[in-house]
Amino acid sequence: MTTVDTRARRAERMRMLGQPIAVVVIVGAVLVWAFSGELDSIEKANINAAKLLRDTWDHLVISFVVTAMVVVIAVPLGVIVTRTWARWAAPVVLGVATVGQAAPAIGVLVLFFLWTEWEGLWAAAIPIAVYSLLPVLRNTVVGIQSVEPALVEAGRGTGMSGSAVLRRIELPLAVPLILAGLRTSLVLAVGTATLGAFVNGGGLGLLIDTGYKLNRPTVLITGAVLAVGLALLVDWLGALAERWLGPKGLR
Amino acid sequence: MNLWDFIVDRWDRLLPEAALHASAVIQCTAIATVIGVAIGIGVYRSPAGSAVATALTSAILTVPSFALLGLLIPVLGLGVAPTVVALVLYALLPIVRNTIVGLSGVDIAITDAAKGIGMNRTRVLTRVELRLAWPAILAGIRVATQLLMGIAAIAAYAKGPGLGTEIFSGLVRAGSANATNQALAGTLGIIILALIVDGAFVLLGRLTIPRGIRD
């Protein structure tokens, strides 16, 4: 299996180098193309620096609110279901989360909107957070469960309390997996945030929707390419974080 | 009208939509399997080729599905064409990656033995390597179908077929009597389809994985 591992690492290295370059080139080219053409009044209202920046900013805000919610909910929940007294709950929680992820993102978003009648940031962020919870939850559970029992025993043997074992042994060893899950969640969140426009949450999906409904391909393409660029960039930052935030001893 | 009455009432429309949804997902997965396994076979012997194929397909998976659909509309118009292209592209990553992992995980001693009894390269591939890699490839195909179930719902935005139509018309009719029922019927329908197809894959695995390598 070692060849498989080196190949996966090699693909990862290639993306670390190629991805930011591709983002800059593609987004740059599309922006130049969009701004250099003859724009009518609708296009001018959508393709200008202020509007593009605001949509991108809204998109990032949704994504980061989602990520914050995912971390705050999924990591503690994952820790709880790996404690001895709650171990029976782990398969139940993971099962529910897995079935939950089989639900289409757009369905979850629309249903939340119809039930609460909320609009805006939270109407987008809460259902997207529910939808992108699973990767972090699963990886927290798997990461803690796969810690060598001998290490936990050794911790107890040196007189550590249960919470000290958790803080100083189990969690640090699970961090690489949790970060990998977080990267997956983050990419899911940035992708799903394009749907936030349907519930007036703003974001780059708004440009796509406007361009489609008003038949302005330039607006549509600009919004879509910015969304693609943002997703690739966030994924790249996630890869960097995975590399640098893990415990030094495990690199 | 409660959800149950709604489903009974609209059954003659929901059923064909569910069938279209499942058939779009299954057909696109089939196309992606042919392309993905072919790519996997083409690159698995070369480390650089495998890395490029994996990096490219995983970059595609990062692209938001709504943005990709948006980009396809000006090029391909509305309806079936953008749906099929988007679904096939998203299904590629799990299939290509698992084909490469499965094929390069085959023990060299086994392929040497196959050559030793006089098999040529094609026969080693079709009779030994692909069969040993099949559980991994099948797992990739299964992941791909689950992924496509949700993406196919978004494709209804570009007038693609399937249950996503119900979700979007529920959104448009927000406030009217059956809006929630519509969105709920579409969402639950997709979850049920996903579970049925997942079960079918377990069965397919039992039928197609060679007896010698079942766990």
Image (cartoon, coloured by chain):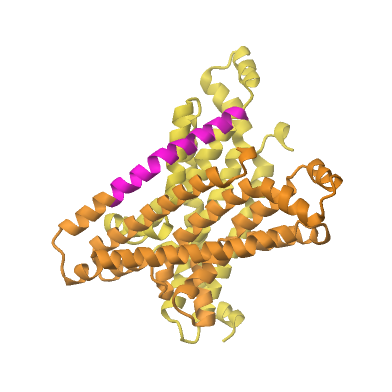
For the N terminus of chain A, the image quarter is: top right
- Secondary structure of the magenta portion, mostly? helix
> Residue placed at 69% from the left, 43% from the top?
B206
A235 or A105: nearer the eye? A235
Magenta span includes A199: no
The residue located at (24%, 55%) in the rendering is A31
Classify B96 as above or below A58: above
Which quadrant of the structure image shows residue B8? bottom right
Residue range in magenta is A1-27
Residue visible at 64% across and 57% down?
Answer: A137
Q: Position of residue A16 (x, y in %)?
A: 44, 40
At x 59% / y 84%, what residue is drawn?
B2
Report the front residue among A230 and B138.
Answer: A230
Tell me what hue chain B is rendered in: yellow
> Quick check: can you spot residue B190?
no
Visual hue assigned to chain A: orange
Q: Is residue B121 visible?
A: yes
Report x, y in % for residue B179: 49, 81
Q: Where is the C terminus of chain A found, in terms of image quarters?
A: top right
